[in-house]
Image (cartoon, rainbow, N blue to C red):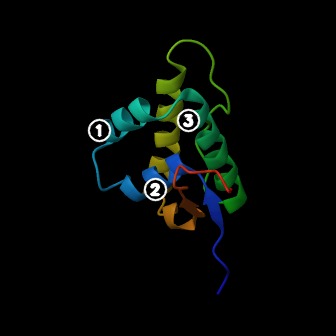
Amino acid sequence: MAAASFVLNNLLCYLKNKFGKSGVKPLKSTVLDFYDVEDLSGAKRQLILDIKDLNLDVVTPHVPERREGDNKAVRTVDDIFTLLTFLDENRKVSLLPCYVANSGNTSFE
């Protein structure tokens, strides 16, 4: 059995655990209210990299790696949900790494 890989990403940990169990609109609203655009962009980049690493036998929808301009946060969240929906429809969500969250206390003193 292969060792599970762990990726520290609070947002992806939250979404992977809630996706499919909660409605999309409330999830998007929660994510937009709680996370800033840098966190959203970082999570999107991580998800894109993780999907590329899966070497899927199906064509992944095109999602630009960067968003600029008005409504950047909303469009970035839409991109993340596009990718998660694609993985869900192709039954590949379980192939993603195990996303974990930190406790918010990053001090190691």
Residue linked to disc 3? 40
Q: Quadrant of residue 66?
A: top right
The CA distance from mark 2 to mark 1 is 15 Å
The image shows residue 52 at horizontal and vertical percentages of: 70, 53
Q: Is residue 9 above or below residue 28?
A: below
Q: Is residue 15 above or below residue 2?
A: above
What residue is shown at x 48% (from left), y 59% (from top)?
90
Q: Earlier in the sequence, mark 2 or mark 1?
A: 2
Residue linked to disc 2? 16
Q: Quadrant of residue 8?
A: bottom right
What residue is shown at x 60% (from left), y 40% (from top)?
44
10 Å crowding of disc 1: few (<14), some (14-19), many (20+): few
The CA distance from mark 2 to mark 3 is 14 Å
What residue is shown at x 46% (from left), y 56% (from top)?
16
Q: Amino acid at mark 3?
A: Leu
The CA distance from mark 3 to mark 1 is 16 Å
Name the foreground residue: 51 vs 97. Answer: 97
10 Å crowding of disc 3: few (<14), some (14-19), many (20+): many
The image shows residue 61 at horizontal and vertical percentages of: 58, 41
The image shows residue 23 at horizontal and vertical percentages of: 28, 45
